[in-house]
């Protein structure tokens, strides 16, 4: 999903004829489709072939408004040559209506586009307005100013034009709030094929005795549409309904539990009742299955969680297609929705009688006012000796309009505007009549609507794509080959989203045609080369293995993730190339390589304690930024010493956060290596609860701190049992207050005891059993800064003063140990540290300021 693919055009009534031939075979002949470029001045043809017509002078609609003003981005930004629906908007100072007469009754998709671009006339970002369609509230008091996290909004509905009353039409009402304006950039209206939402009764979860009604006139809003194990699908070539499907990894709770499987999309069968319009074969051809499936002893669920608005009912559609079995009736599993059984011992093949056959099933679940999460799980049945496996291919979650005819929870309970029988609705009908009476027969309608929602939570995974899209408007869609235009000095750039698209030729030259002698390393993704770009910048070039199952999605997600992040302590993405089937990412070059190499397993000179502290602080800043600095919190998921890279000056930068989020979709070997590789860093609480939070990164970072202190791997099976796991081993010493016993011998004599204590305490807190007990990265950062100050204060006093604070060659702590009063000495040393550190403290009030 992500950003609408670009551009939108208004297809007129008869634009069916211009629909590419691919649709000819589709089971459904589209009767009506309207693509409207609001505020536009001429027809806008998108890459996908659709033509959006301007709203003014459009024969297919009536715009009734006392005051409407078309604004264009091109006036204030004449250098913008991209073709985009988001270059213009229609702005309304009074409540206004678009009336569109449809040819038929039935359900329609409705997609609304909002993008508050800057312009001289209006501040669209602060506009507050409501939107209704045929009396159903879609947005109530919406404002981009309130939704800090999103820069654009695309909503999609399918609504029913009932034909009741006097006709067939859709009336979209936009009403500005006090002294504000309303605006809209684009509108799409497309008929929904029969059979898409044919059953008016579906199963409910928790499973009741009878089916529940889905009222025909209920509006639906798509909250999520997910392609499990697959990639982002937004091209109309791949979805006959111009829908977007997004990858699932952002929602997987236990990434390591799932493994991506793919089949040839051409092998998918569509039995009667299921067509490409239900879901493209690209959706059915990928799935997540249980990692290490076929091990019969294994019993766990694959879980996905989706944040949704509380208090609404949701229609949940699960898409299945058995692309894993070699015979019928071999794949039997359970499906749970919100911890309740939805399908018990479900056997897809018993329904489809065929393998690789598309199947979908709908459920309705009501969320109380306390729940804002939908949890979908698949797992093996408990009492079976069959090889355990479970799959899911696709998932759609649609919010249903409530009894107030609203899809916006902000609508106050006593608000009449949305009530069907209320004055609001009558007024709406009246206006609709007025609006339409001018030219056409008067029509009234009731609808169901279907919404592609780009909302906060939803934004979580969508936004990256949006920002990438916004920064490369000409790159919208699936164009596979782009060449950079001009050169861009990334080293000084600080605006997120500015990444170059590099030509393959440029990269080939930079790496001397991928010279083996330039290989820096090999990862699951492919080879990493050192390269020098034309402008002299040294870069690391990660070239995706074309055969790697990891594929395009991960590649794009990495780009999307990285495109919106820029921080001194995160490795930056300089550009990428997506040409000729190549998937290449170009990063800043980190001359000193991974932190681990400087700790053990190489002949590099040991890092001093101060350097180690500074590196930890740098990495903590990077993680702190990931968790808090970006518009939405990002969890790294794979914090370890090999993912902390050092540049020439030993500045630490966190790397690989895009890919690490994608753990589950890596190919099998990669998943198992990833699990092994990160073994020792894994948050026990994450495993237990299968809920990923920032605190999982904090745990892993605690392990990193110990590794830095002790210069040994997190897990070393060669050691005696109690020493194998660094976290256990070090914590047993920390609890005794004797962490110094096990530190890197090369540090001995150079570490201030107070600094070490602070460091040890910090690591201990990070490793707390339960996430809630662990500090935030901000606290960790603060504590590390403090440890550094303690260290510096001690060395300063050593050099400037003399005997009083002198630190002997034999460290204080060693003396303590010799004297056998380690525990007893603590009180004294605490007091000392308080005294010496109080000055230091004041400098630390704003750790972020540093
Ligand atoms: C879309 O379909 C084309 C073939 O029509 C295929 O090559 C391409 O990989 C598909 N893209 C996605 C994102 O599914
Ligand atoms: C499902 O169960 C988990 C763990 O028992 C719990 O944390 C979660 O809140 C439950 N979710 C719902 C929607 O009931
Ligand atoms: C899967 O999840 C359901 C509902 O949350 C739970 O009842 C069941 O025990 C889980 N199964 C396994 C094997 O963990």
Image (tube, helix red, strand yellow):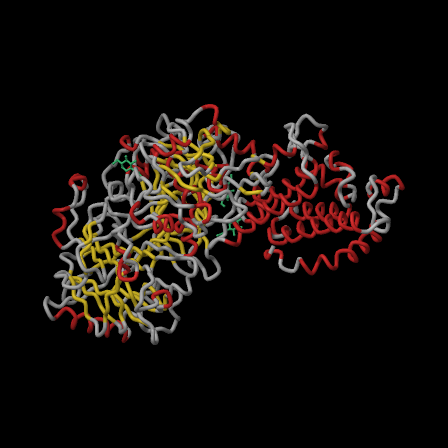
Observer-nearest of 722 and 800: 800
* Residue for point 88% across, 39% down: 818
**Residue 557 drawn at (x, y percent):** 41, 42
Q: Which image quarter holds the C terminus?
A: bottom right
**Residue 606 drawn at (x, y percent):** 68, 34
* Residue for point 38% across, 30% down: 508
**Residue 304 drawn at (x, y percent):** 45, 45
Above or below, 781 against 671 in this view is below
Observer-nearest of 67 and 541: 541
**Residue 720 drawn at (x, y percent):** 72, 28
Indicate the quadrant of ligand 1 in the picture: top left
Horizontal side of residue 94 vs 145, given as left or right: left
Observer-nearest of 735 and 541: 541
Picture mark count: 0
**Is residue 792 among what the camera can see?**
yes
Residue 642 figure quarter: top right
**Is residue 381 among what the camera can see?**
no
Horizontal side of residue 67 vs 849, given as left or right: left
Most extreme residue toward the right, as rendered?
819
* Residue for point 51% across, 35% down: 299
Horizontal side of residue 803 vs 48, given as left or right: right
Residue 21 figure quarter: top left
């Amino acid at each position: 999903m992500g950003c609408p693919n670009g551009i939108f055009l208004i297809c007129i009534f008869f634009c069916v004829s211009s629909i590419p031939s691919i649709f000819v075979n589709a089971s459904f002949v589209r009767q009506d489709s309207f693509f409207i470029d609001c505020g536009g001045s001429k027809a806008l043809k998108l890459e996908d072939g659709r033509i959006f017509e301007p709203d003014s002078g459009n024969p297919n609609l009536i715009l009734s408004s006392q005051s409407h003003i078309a604004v264009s981005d091109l006036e204030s930004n004449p250098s913008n040559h991209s073709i985009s629906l988001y270059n213009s908007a229609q702005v309304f100072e009074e409540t206004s209506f678009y009336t569109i007469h449809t040819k038929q009754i039935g359900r329609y998709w409705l997609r609304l586009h909002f993008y508050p671009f800057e312009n001289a006339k209006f501040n669209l970002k602060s506009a507050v307005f409501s939107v209704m369609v045929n009396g159903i509230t879609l947005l109530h008091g919406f404002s981009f100013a309130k939704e800090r996290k999103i820069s654009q909004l695309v909503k999609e509905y399918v609504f029913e034009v009932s034909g009741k009353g006097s006709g067939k039409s859709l009336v979209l009402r936009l009403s500005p709030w006090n002294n504000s304006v309303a605006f809209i950039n684009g509108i799409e209206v497309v008929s929904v094929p029969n059979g898409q939402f044919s059953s008016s009764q579906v199963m409910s979860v928790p499973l009741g005795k009878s089916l529940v009604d889905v009222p025909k006139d209920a509006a639906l809003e798509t909250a999520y549409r997910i392609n499990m194990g697959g990639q982002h699908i937004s091209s109309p070539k791949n979805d006959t309904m111009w829908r977007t499907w997004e990858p699932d990894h952002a929602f997987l709770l236990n990434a390591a539990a799932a493994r991506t499987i793919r089949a040839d999309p051409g092998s998918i069968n569509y039995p009667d009742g299921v067509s490409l319009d239900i879901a493209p074969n690209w959706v059915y051809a990928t799935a997540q299955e249980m990692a290490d499936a076929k091990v019969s002893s294994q019993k766990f669920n694959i879980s996905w969680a989706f944040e949704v608005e509380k208090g609404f009912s949701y229609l949940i559609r699960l898409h299945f297609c058995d692309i894993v079995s070699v015979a019928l009736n071999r794949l039997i599993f359970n499906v749970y929705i919100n911890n309740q059984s939805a399908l018990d011992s479900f056997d897809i093949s018993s329904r489809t009688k065929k393998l690789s056959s598309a199947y979908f099933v709908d459920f309705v679940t009501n969320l109380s006012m306390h729940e804002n999460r939908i949890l979908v799980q698949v797992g093996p049945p408990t009492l079976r000796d069959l090889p355990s496996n479970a799959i899911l291919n696709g998932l759609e979650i649609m919010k249903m309009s409530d009894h107030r005819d609203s899809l916006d929870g902000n609508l106050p309970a006593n608000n009449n505007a949305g009530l069907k029988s209320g004055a609001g609705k009558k007024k709406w009908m009246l206006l609709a009549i007025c609006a339409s009476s001018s030219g056409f027969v008067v029509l009234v309608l009731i609808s169901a609507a279907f919404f592609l929602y780009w909302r906060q939570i939803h934004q979580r995974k969508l936004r990256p794509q949006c920002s990438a899209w916004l920064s490369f408007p000409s790159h919208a869609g699936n164009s596979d080959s782009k060449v950079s235009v001009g050169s861009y000095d990334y080293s000084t750039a600080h605006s997120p989203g500015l990444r170059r698209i590099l030509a393959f030729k440029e990269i080939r030259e930079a790496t001397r045609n991928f010279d083996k002698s330039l290989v820096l390393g090999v990862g699951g993704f492919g080879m990493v080369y050192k390269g020098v770009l034309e402008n002299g910048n040294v870069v690391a070039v990660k070239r995706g293995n074309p055969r790697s199952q990891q594929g395009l999605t991960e590649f794009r997600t990495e780009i999307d993730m990285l495109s919106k992040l820029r921080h001194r302590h995160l490795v930056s993405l300089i550009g990428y190339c997506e040409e000729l089937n190549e998937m290449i990412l170009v990063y800043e070059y980190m001359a000193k390589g991974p932190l681990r190499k400087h700790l053990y397993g190489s002949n590099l000179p040991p890092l001093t304690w101060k350097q180690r502290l500074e590196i930890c602080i740098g990495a903590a800043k990077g993680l702190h930024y990931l968790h808090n600095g970006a518009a939405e919190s990002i969890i790294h998921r794979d914090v370890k010493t090999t993912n902390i890279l050092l540049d020439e000056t030993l500045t630490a930068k966190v790397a690989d956060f895009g890919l690490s989020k994608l753990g589950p979709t890596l190919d099998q070997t990669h998943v198992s290596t990833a699990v092994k590789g990160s073994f020792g860093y894994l948050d026990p609480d994450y495993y237990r609860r299968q809920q990923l939070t920032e605190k999982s990164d904090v745990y892993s970072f605690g392990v990193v701190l110990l590794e830095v202190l002790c210069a040994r791997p997190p897990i070393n099976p060669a050691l005696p049992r109690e020493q194998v796991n660094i976290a256990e081993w070090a914590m047993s010493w920390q609890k005794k207050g004797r962490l110094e016993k096990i530190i890197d011998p090369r540090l001995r004599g150079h570490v201030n005891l107070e600094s070490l204590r602070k460091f040890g305490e910090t690591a201990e807190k990070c490793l707390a059993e339960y996430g809630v007990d662990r500090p935030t990265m901000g606290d960790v950062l603060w504590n590390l800064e403090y440890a550094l100050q303690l260290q510096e204060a001690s060395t300063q006093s050593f050099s400037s003063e003399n005997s009083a604070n002198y630190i002997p060659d034999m460290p204080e702590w060693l003396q303590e140990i010799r004297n056998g009063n380690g525990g007893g000495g603590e009180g004294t040393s605490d007091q000392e540290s308080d005294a010496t550190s109080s000055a230091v403290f004041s400098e630390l009030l704003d750790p972020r300021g540093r």
